[in-house]
Amino acid sequence: MFRVSFISVFFIFICQNLNAHIDHNKNLKKIEFDIYRNNEKVGYHKVIFSSKSGVKEISTEVFFDIKLLGVSIYKYHSLGKEIYKDNKLIEFKSTTKDGNDKDYCNINRSDNGVYNFDGTTEGKFFKYSSNKDFSLGTWWNHDVLINNNFVLGQSCRSTETKVTFLNKEERVINNKKQIVQLFNVKGEGIDVKVGFTDNTFQWVSMDFSLKGEWNYQLKTLN
């Protein structure tokens, strides 16, 4: 019952325009959130950054487990990996266990700059090539706010979103007061409030309503 919307919420992946801003996170090693539903912790979302010899790798893991009376009724576990060279996305791969289903998305960049997509979800296959700009957003990159041509990393399906600035808030992050800009990202199956720090453009919050109230609480940003 959660399946369709969670495909959108947890894996919307962005690519070309995000290349220009990947260095905003060059000093980060890890972003980690605890995921809460109706004020109960149900899982986590982790983003790990590494770099070697000009190649950058960003690994994402999302897990949550919905329980009723102590019995698990829905589990989600997704692993994704983005590889960049010279600040260009050259490869993305993900595998997702969504309830009883197994989904995947593979994206690679050809020498001529064309991206090739291959993915599946709910028995539907998405296989195509495109040189059109698109966004790669495991949410960690604020380019999720810039390009509305998204590719969902769980399935490689493309979709569009509309981004609306909401407001700014002062929050304490890493024991320091910082200004956070909040935006609404909305599209087919997507209606999320996401926050980025005002000056460093680092991802620090996400909230949405979907069969309950969901909240990402920042655990690690270093």
Image (cartoon, rainbow, N blue to C red):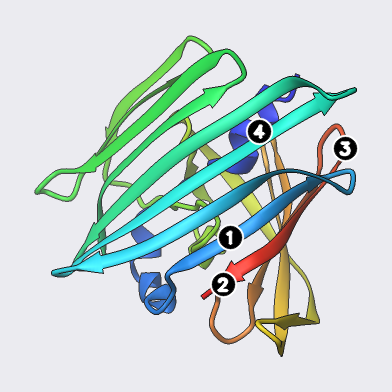
Amino acid type, mark 2: Leu
* Secondary structure found at label 2: strand
Q: Which numbered disc flags the more N-terminal residue, 2 or 3?
A: 3
- Cβ atoms under marks 1 and 3 closer than 8 Å: no
Image point 66% across, 58% down: which residue? 163
Query: In this figure, which residue is indicated by the disc labeled 3?
Result: 212
Q: Which mark is residue 127?
A: none
Q: Nearer the viewer, mark 2 or mark 3?
A: 2
Image point 59% across, 50% down: which residue? 45
Q: Which numbered disc flags the more N-terminal residue, 3 or 4?
A: 4
Amino acid type, mark 1: Glu
Q: Nearer the viewer, mark 4 or mark 1?
A: 1
Q: Which numbered disc flags the more N-terminal residue, 4 or 1?
A: 4
- Cβ atoms under marks 4 and 2 closer than 8 Å: no
Q: Is residue 176 above or below residue 209?
A: below
Residue 200 rendering spot, x and y as whole percentages: 54, 83
Q: Nearer the viewer, mark 1 or mark 3?
A: 1
Q: CA distance from mark 1 to mark 2?
A: 7 Å
Q: Residues within 10 Å of mark 2 (few under 14, many from 20)?
A: some
Image point 58% across, 13% down: which residue? 100
The N terminus lies in quadrant: top right
Q: CA distance from mark 3 to mark 4?
A: 13 Å
Query: In this figure, which residue is indicated by the disc labeled 1?
Result: 32
- Cβ atoms under marks 1 and 2 closer than 8 Å: yes
Query: In this figure, which residue is indicated by the disc labeled 2?
Result: 221
Q: Residue furthest top?
A: 123
Amino acid type, mark 4: Phe
Q: CA distance from mark 1 to mark 3?
A: 22 Å
Q: CA distance from mark 4 to mark 2?
A: 24 Å
Query: In this figure, which residue is indicated by the disc labeled 4?
Result: 6
Q: Residue furthest front?
A: 70
